[in-house]
């Protein structure tokens, strides 16, 4: 399998490439970036470690080199300028993203190609990727709340001194202000977490999850390792047709009464991309949270240029 990362010279793209390299599952990792020198530097650094991890082909290329990819992961994005509004940043990222899609159209992408959308606002850009490119919705997967979910699990584990890999709890809805924690189904090793975490501590863990992105930006400039691992989790489920159920963003078709909007619900991810978007029974307030995300995302969609 060939994976091309557009924005691969940046922090998120290069960390995703490293996570893909460490796992040694995909055959080819190509990095494309507007800053071609940076992409070349990251590819070279990764290549230097190849003999210690796996027999993969890792290189930098231009947009034409993306044409024969099985998976195109887009992490190209801009950061907020001082005093810039959220909507202004959204509009700058939407036009950047359209530019990337235009150049991919020019390069010619395989019709089976699956897009993994990471750039923010990820739910809006996932929908844009489907509608602007006219790409089949099941072949466009947004990273959605995969990163928020691993943050949530890891923070629950740290707060309660539990093994992180045995904590099973999810965040659904928008990757943004209206994300919704799902406590109704949260477990550790099959035991309900709701009985072990008192409501004030639940609120505190969720608050930390929700503000994690901003905290990491403040401390080190931007998220890298955890988002890289999150991207690899999604790409490996495609590469190995694992059919893992992940909280990725996809275009909904009636789940919880939501249509057309892209957001995260538990989703089966396999070789064909989005294989099913599920609608498990949740507490009414959790469903209301997901529906509030849909309204917020629809409102943003209506405002973008
Ligand atoms: N969905 C998530 O969970 C999640 C998590 C973290 C970051 N992000 C988003 O990922 C994006 C990247 O973040 P980052 O920290 O890596 O930023 P970064 O500035 O380190 O990297 C962005 C890269 O994109 C490149 N780029 C810009 N325009 C391009 C174009 N037209 N074609 C190709 N490359 C282009 C830049 O040269 C840069 O190397 C941002 O939008 C950020 O908000 C998403």
Image (cartoon, grey):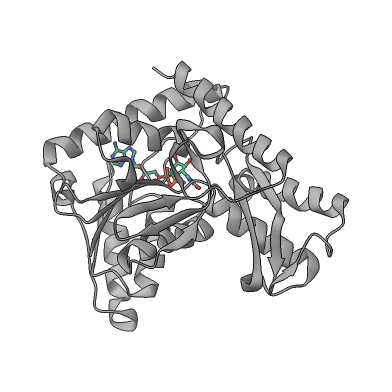
Q: Is residue 293 above or below residue 37?
A: above
* Image mark count: 0
Question: Which of 58/114 is in front?
Answer: 114
Residue 46, x across and y down, in percent = 32, 68
Q: Is residue 106 left or right of residue 80?
A: left
The residue that appears at 62% across and 57% down in the rendered structure is 151
Q: Quadrant of residue 292?
A: top right
Residue 117 appears in the rendering:
no
Q: Is residue 209 left or right of residue 96?
A: right
- Split into 4 quadrants, where in the image is the N terminus? bottom left
- Residue that lies at the very extreme toward the bottom in this rendered image: 52
Residue 6, x across and y down, in percent = 29, 47
Q: Quadrant of ligand 1?
A: top left
Q: Is residue 224 left or right of residue 59?
A: right
The residue that appears at 33% across and 51% down in the rendered structure is 9
Residue 65, x across and y down, in percent = 14, 51
Residue 240, x across and y down, in percent = 33, 69
Q: Quadrant of residue 20?
A: bottom left
Question: Which of 194/104 is in front?
Answer: 194
């Amino acid at each position: 399998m060939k994976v091309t990362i557009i924005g691969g010279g940046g922090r998120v793209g290069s960390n995703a490439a490293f996570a893909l390299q460490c796992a040694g599952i995909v055959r080819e990792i190509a990095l494309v970036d507007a800053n071609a020198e940076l992409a070349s530097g990251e590819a070279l650094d990764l290549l230097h470690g190849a003999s210690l991890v796996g027999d993969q082909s890792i290189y930098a290329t231009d947009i034409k080199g993306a044409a024969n990819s099985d998976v195109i992961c887009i992490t190209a994005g801009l950061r907020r300028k001082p005093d810039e509004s959220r909507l202004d940043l959204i509009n700058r990222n939407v036009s950047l993203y359209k530019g990337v899609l235009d150049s991919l159209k020019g390069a010619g992408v395989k019709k089976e190609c699956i897009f993994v959308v990471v750039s923010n606002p990820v739910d809006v850009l996932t929908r844009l990727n489907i509608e602007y490119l006219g790409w089949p919705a099941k072949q466009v997967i947004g990273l959605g709340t995969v990163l928020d979910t691993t943050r949530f699990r890891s923070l629950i584990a740290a707060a309660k001194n539990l093994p992180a890999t045995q904590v099973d709890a999810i965040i659904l809805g928008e990757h943004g202000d209206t994300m919704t924690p799902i406590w109704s189904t949260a477990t550790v090793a099959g035991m309900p977490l709701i009985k072990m975490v008192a409501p004030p501590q639940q609120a505190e863990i969720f608050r930390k999850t929700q503000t994690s992105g901003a905290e990491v930006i403040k401390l080190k400039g931007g998220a890298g390792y955890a988002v890289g691992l999150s991207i690899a989790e999604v790409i490996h489920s495609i590469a190995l047709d694992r059919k893992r159920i992940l909280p990725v963003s996809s275009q909904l078709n009636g789940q919880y009464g939501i249509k057309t909007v892209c957001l995260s619900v538990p989703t089966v991810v396999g070789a064909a991309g989005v294989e099913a978007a599920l609608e498990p029974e949740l507490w009414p307030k959790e469903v209301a949270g997901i529906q509030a995300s849909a309204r917020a995302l629809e409102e943003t969609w209506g405002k973008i240029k």
